[in-house]
Amino acid sequence: MLFVGILGVVVIYGGFFYLFFSGRDTSAIPWFFLLSPWICIFFGLSEAEQRRTLVWFIAKFKR
């Protein structure tokens, strides 16, 4: 899962940034396509790393 997520980040974000910087319309790419590889990366982590990631997110977005 981790490898698929990393490959997804490279491919999807590579295509997105190519379209973005070449001046083409990026509205055809739904927002969840940009989020999907990160979900694969998260579930590819070990259980302890997932917990640490969640704690980090909660601390980051908590006031």
Image (cartoon, helix red, strand yellow):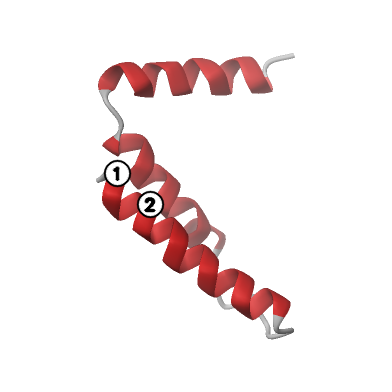
Q: Amino acid at mark 2?
A: Ile
- Image vertical order of residue 23 relative to residue 30, above or below: below
| Residue 13 percent location from the top left of the image | 53, 64
Give the residue pinned by disc 1.
2
| Residue 8 percent location from the top left of the image | 38, 60
Q: Amino acid at mark 1?
A: Leu
CB atoms at circles 1 and 2 under 8 Å apart? yes
| Residue 40 percent location from the top left of the image | 33, 46
Q: Residue at x 29, y 54 (%)?
A: 4
Assign a secondary structure to mark 1.
Answer: helix
- Image vertical order of residue 27 relative to residue 10, above or below: below
What is the crowding at mark 2: few (fewer than 14 residues within 10 Å), some, or many (at least 20)?
some
Give the residue pinned by disc 2.
6
Q: Residue at x 70, y 84 (%)?
A: 22
Quadrant position of residue 28 = bottom right
- Image vertical order of residue 2 relative to residue 27, above or below: above
The residues tagged by marks 1 and 2 sit, at their Cα atoms, a distance apart of 6 Å
